[in-house]
Image: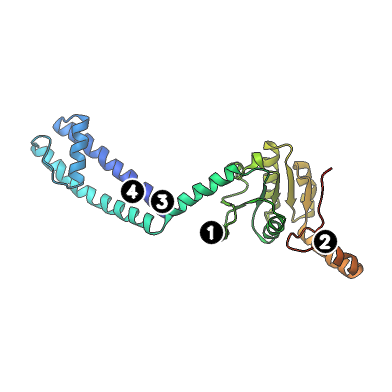
Amino acid sequence: MTPSFKRLQIAAALLGGVLCFGSLGYVWIEGYSALEAIYMTVITVSTVGFREVRSLSDGGMLFTAVLIVSSIGTFTFAASAVTQFFLEGDYRERIRLKRIQRIMNEMDNHIIVCGYGRVGEKATQELQDHDREVVIIESNIELVRKLRDSGVHVLEGDATEDENLLNAGLDRARALITTLPDDAQNLYVVLAAKERRKDLLIISRASNANAVSKLKVAGAQNVIMPDQVGGAHMASLVAIPDVMEFLDHIRIQGADEVNLEEIEV
């Protein structure tokens, strides 16, 4: 929730409070009906100058003066909140978020990527090169905005929260890749996803070797340690350079002329 939208909510609550305060005051002091009290409060705080429902008593006139003075600050704050909300483009952002969520709700057989760090970014690029639909869950708001501007389906939030996994289409996803830097967070994502979808393919990142077995027990079919894979790859480039160069060339790279594909039979 953006700060300007919070200000808008506060302004609405304050206006509602002024309306209730004024209405109750007129009912108690002047004996107005509920409708008359609301009408009197609205024309008083809005200073439109309509004549009173009935002539006011001394207590009613004093209350009206207090109501006008107390409502000035509320209306000033409300006007600034509304202006800020529209000038900063929050309403457009909220409309865009609803459109993005509607698109995500219609997606099927896609891949969810939790975290868009270096590992998540590379995984996403590889999948997109291979024409796979990807939904990213990322908590960094600045990174989320950049991804949305580039047309990527991304959901702002914490991937460890069940609600965000469901909003990303967990029930309809083909697979989930969690690349969060913390093993405990990856473990929670795996547990939450597996509890909801027993048949879901889950691939997890691990930073510590001790976490590999725990992630597999939790339900991850594959656990990848980027440092270990990178070190083994560099050693292989020294030991068997020609083989590794060939394998690098035919690996999953939709942007290359040569690809290694899997065909189900």
**Residue 29 image point, x, y percent:** 15, 33
Mark 3 to mark 1 CA distance (whole Å): 17 Å
Name the residue that disc number 4 marks. Answer: 11
Q: Along the horizontal axis of the image, is 194 left or right of 81?
A: right
Q: Is residue 173 above or below residue 230?
A: above
> Could you tell which of marks 3 and 4 lies nearer the N-terminus?
3
> Could you tell which of marks 1 and 2 lies nearer the N-terminus?
1
Q: Give me the residue at 62% from left, 48% from top.
A: 159
Q: Residue furthest right?
A: 239
Name the residue that disc number 3 marks. Answer: 5
What residue type is disc 4 on?
Ala
The one of 238 and 135 positioned closer to us in this rendering: 135
> Which numbered circle lies on residue 250?
2
> Could you tell which of marks 4 and 1 lies nearer the N-terminus?
4
Q: Secondary structure at mark 2?
A: helix
- Looking at the image, do the residues carrying marks 4 and 2 touch, with CB atoms under 8 Å apart? no
